[in-house]
Amino acid sequence: MSSLAHQRCFNHFQRESVARCPDCGRYFCRECITEHDDRVICAACLARIARAPLLRRRALADLGRAAACLLGVVVVWFFFYLVGAALLAIPTSFHEGVLWQSTPD
Ligand SMILES: [Zn+2]
Ligand SMILES: [Zn+2]
């Protein structure tokens, strides 16, 4: 670990590194490294870790929206299917005007 002092920060070439990111293995200066879950990690890896669950949540939301859209299509299709079935169930005589014809005589 004595070589640590001779390493330079990945972001600041003029600064000596104080820690090594366990995630990406790069060396960073005090300003570039942060503590996260009781371990030091670089800002880039921290951002990656913080963003990962958010992406998964967004993907899940997209999936939910797609499912809701599909469900809506099915519901609309079923509604029109019922309307069609109801129209078919109406006797033909209803469409031939006998019901609303004025008195025959
Ligand atoms: Zn890192
Ligand atoms: Zn730095």
Image (cartoon, rainbow, N blue to C red):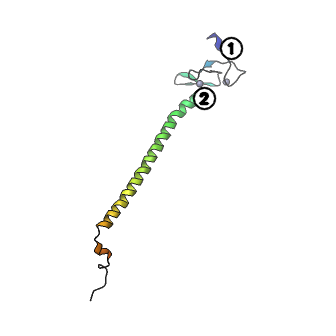
* Mark 1 vs mark 2, CA separation in Å: 22 Å
Q: Front-most of 33 and 56? A: 56
Residue 64, percent from left and from top: 44, 45
* Kind of residue sitting beneath label 1: His
**Residue at the spot of label 1:** 6
Q: Front-most of 15 and 48? A: 48
Q: Residue at x 52, y 33 (%)?
A: 52
Marks 1 & 2, CB-CB < 8 Å contact: no
Instruction: Tell me: 104 left or right of 42.
Output: left
Tag of residue 22? none
Precedes in sequence: disc 1 or disc 2? 1
In the image as oriented, which residue stretches furthest toward the bottom?
105
Picture quadrant of ligand 1: top right
Q: Residue at x 54, y 32 (%)?
A: 50
Q: Front-most of 4 and 56? A: 56
Instruction: Tell me: 35 left or right of 86.
Output: right
Q: Residue at x 54, y 34 (%)?
A: 51
**Residue at the spot of label 2:** 44
Q: Residues within 10 Å of mark 2 (few under 14, many from 20)?
A: some
